[in-house]
Image: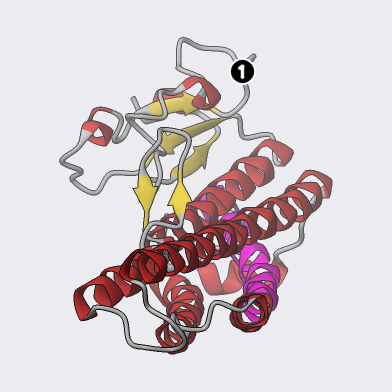
Amino acid sequence: MAEHNYDKQVEELVRYYKQAVERIKSELDRFDLSDFSRANQLATLKNIADILKGLNEDAAQWVADNIPMAARAGVADAIVALGVVNTAAEAMQIVKFNRVNKELVAAAVADTQADLLAVTQNVERRVKATVRQVVGEAMRQNLAQGINGRRTMNADIMAGLRGKLGDSLNTGIIDSAGRRWDPKVYVDMLSRTKMMRMTMDATINEAVDREAYYGQISSHGAKDACRNWEGRIVKLVADAPGDYPYIGDLPGREIFHPRCRHTVSPIRRPDRYE
């Protein structure tokens, strides 16, 4: 089975986020820390919200284009592996989504769009909170130093406050394990993982539809825990005969983890591959 490389597609999506982050950073750099009016804050936050709105639209379109593409690649993999045709190019000519894969794609598109929307919502929430915090600190500094009007604040204090604004963009995501992520890094991991998983799930669904209930995990010389599963035969449905592990029960920390490159190639007669 072909090893899929979605670097180009993932890089396109990450580029959208990099560009949005740079534009937001420019807005924060222009933010006047000596103007404590609510109108000043609202104007900056509206500009940032508009940038993120455009990002959400770009990301949603990316998902609508690329998740189905990854699924078609998975269906083609199954068609080739089961000997229906000889090449991926031939397989792509006859790819159709069965009912299960149609539902899978629709759900995956919705889930991925929701996950990416959560990224921008986290960024917006964190930036908004930091802007308010920084304005509050600037006001207190002014009061403590007796600064009136629009006199310039101490340069070190100003630099520290601007640093906080910039940091709000660097750790906009906190995952379920409590780890902080740069949004761009998180989007790379999320989109890459979603596409690979989409390809594999579509492969499995097509294989089962064609009455192939087993698969062989790919091998590429992994150095991590995945190496213990390379070449192993697995069941694609839990009640298939034979003493093989069910793919749905495999430990996620060891195989098919985030960014995992391993795939599964469907087979009908597992005894021939043992």
The N terminus, quarter of image: bottom left
The C terminus, quarter of image: top left
In the rendered structure, which segment of residues is drawn in magenta? 54-82
Given residues 196 and 119, the one toward you in this image is 119
Image location of residue 6, percent across then percent down: 44, 68
Give the amino acid at mark 1.
Ala
Q: What element carries label 1?
A: loop
Given residues 55 and 111, the one toward you in this image is 55
Q: In this view, does 13 lie above or below 27?
A: above
Q: Residue at x 31, y 80 (%)?
A: 153
Image location of residue 246, percent across then percent down: 52, 20
Specify whether 141 is left or right of 97: left
Q: In this view, does 263 lie above or below 105?
A: above
Q: Residue at x 46, y 10 (%)?
A: 243
Q: Which residue is drawn at 62% across and 68% down?
A: 69
Given residues 159 and 228, the one toward you in this image is 159
Residue that carries the numbered disc 1 in the rendered image = 238
Specify whether 210 is left or right of 177: right
